[in-house]
Image (cartoon, helix red, strand yellow):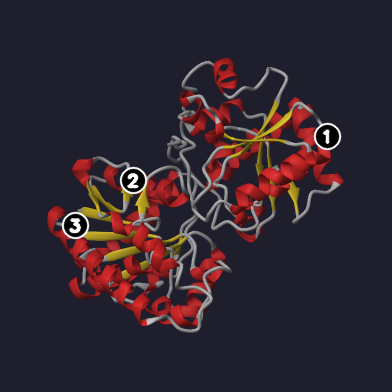
Amino acid sequence: MRIGFVSTRFQGTDGVTLEAAKWAEIFESMGHCCFWFSGLSDRAESHSFVEPEAFFGHPKAREIDEKLWDRDQLSSTTQQQIASMRQTLRQALEDFGNRFHLDLIVAQNALTIPMQIPLGLALKDWLAEKKVPAIAHHHDFFWERERFRGGGVQPFLDEAFPPSLPDLQHVVINSEAARELERRKGLPSVVLPNVMNFSGTPPEPSRPLVEIRQLLDFTPEDHIFLQPTRIIPRKGIEHAIDLLAARGNAHDKLLVSHQAGDEGFAYLSFLREKARSCSVDFRCIDDSEVPAARSLPLWDLYHIADFVTYPSLYEGFGNALLETFAFRKPILVNRYSVFLEDIEPHGFQVAKMDGIITPETVGQVERLLSDKAYSRHCTETNFNLAKQHFGYPILEKTLAGLLDQSSPCSSEVSSSEVSSSVVSSSGSASSPPSRT
């Protein structure tokens, strides 16, 4: 089959981009061919269709987005702008399908979170008209984000986020999302958690660890606490600052691996001020004045990390958590709802917090840092549990079932046989991502 992936961007190390790459890896291992439609792309040009207006950060898209939320009504000008971009993107999707002769579409969050509403509307229009078999991979719905509110925009959310189409299957990444999708939209779904490649060893560091630390201006005595996420409010990075402040160790350094900007820069400013007031050494890798440091792959940062902080307020699943398990690093986790229901019951050994850093939390972190035998036991346990529950075999099995449902010869099989299932398996998964 010729499979077309659609999203606002396929570039960098955000969760949608990473999971799409894993899906493509499995599809291609089955003998299928994958193509990419997005506003930003780092995929091969020969297999890509880039329409800049599809990116949520395009000036036209930002102008529309600024007029949508917390409004009872949308102005006629805003509605005209949406309609115009909707048509532009509808035609671009048509051209994408024609250029690559696609048999199946995989919408990666484009019909889920309304960061680029005209794209979701255009994709819904195209799928409905052409009746192309499609799979919608949902990472985070609009009702999971407080900022996506407003009566004026609700008709668009009802129409396409996600839509109900006869040839569209729905895949969610956690159990809670499946329940809410059924309750709110009456749509059944497959639950497929994020996965990693636990069958091999993580990538080797790009250069000696001593050199990586020097590039980032760390001394041999420093304790590097890695926050391997984007800088957006729901990541709860202020709690990582609270942890280091509570420890009060001058050698503790907090390093954030990803950029700010997806949701503005106010949160970054808040974090900098909080770190300053708490006397915490807070660094973002993109702050480095050394080009080689800014271009280090993400796995280099895991290699030099002594500890990983993951104090997220909410996660659809948790790619960074799986990456940490793959690199056998100790971690602090804020017990967000998906972790509580879909991950913690498997028995992972992590330092835990429930919304605040307590003396008990600090004690758990201290033991993982100081007791090397205990830390090795915990990280090995986590690796083996992650391999069992969140490896590639679950992805292979689930995607094979979805493709069977998308095939014309499967019409006699009830869609509920797959769509209502929660699939679990054991296995292996893909290499940790590079950082761009």
**CB atoms at circles 2 and 1 under 8 Å apart?**
no
Question: Could you tell which of marks 2 and 1 lies nearer the N-terminus?
Answer: 2
Q: Which residue is mark 2?
A: 26
Q: Which residue is mark 3?
A: 96
Q: Which residue is mark 1?
A: 248
Q: Amino acid at mark 1?
A: Gly
Give the left or right position of residue 282, taking residue 171 as reference. right
Residue 72 as seen in the image, left or right of residue 57? right
Q: Residue at x 53, y 54 (%)?
A: 264
Q: Nearer the viewer, residue 364 or 373?
A: 364
Are there few (<14), some (14-19), or many (20+) residues within 10 Å of tag 3?
many
Q: CA distance from mark 3 to mark 1?
A: 55 Å
| Badge 2: residue crowd in 10 Å (few <14, some 14–19, many ≥20) | many
Q: Find residue 235 and report its horizontal and vertical position in percent.
A: 61, 52
Q: Amino acid at mark 3?
A: Phe
**Of the image marks 3 and 2, the number of the one nearer the N terminus:** 2
Q: Residues within 10 Å of mark 1 (few under 14, many from 20)?
A: few
Residue displayed at 27% across by 60% down: 105
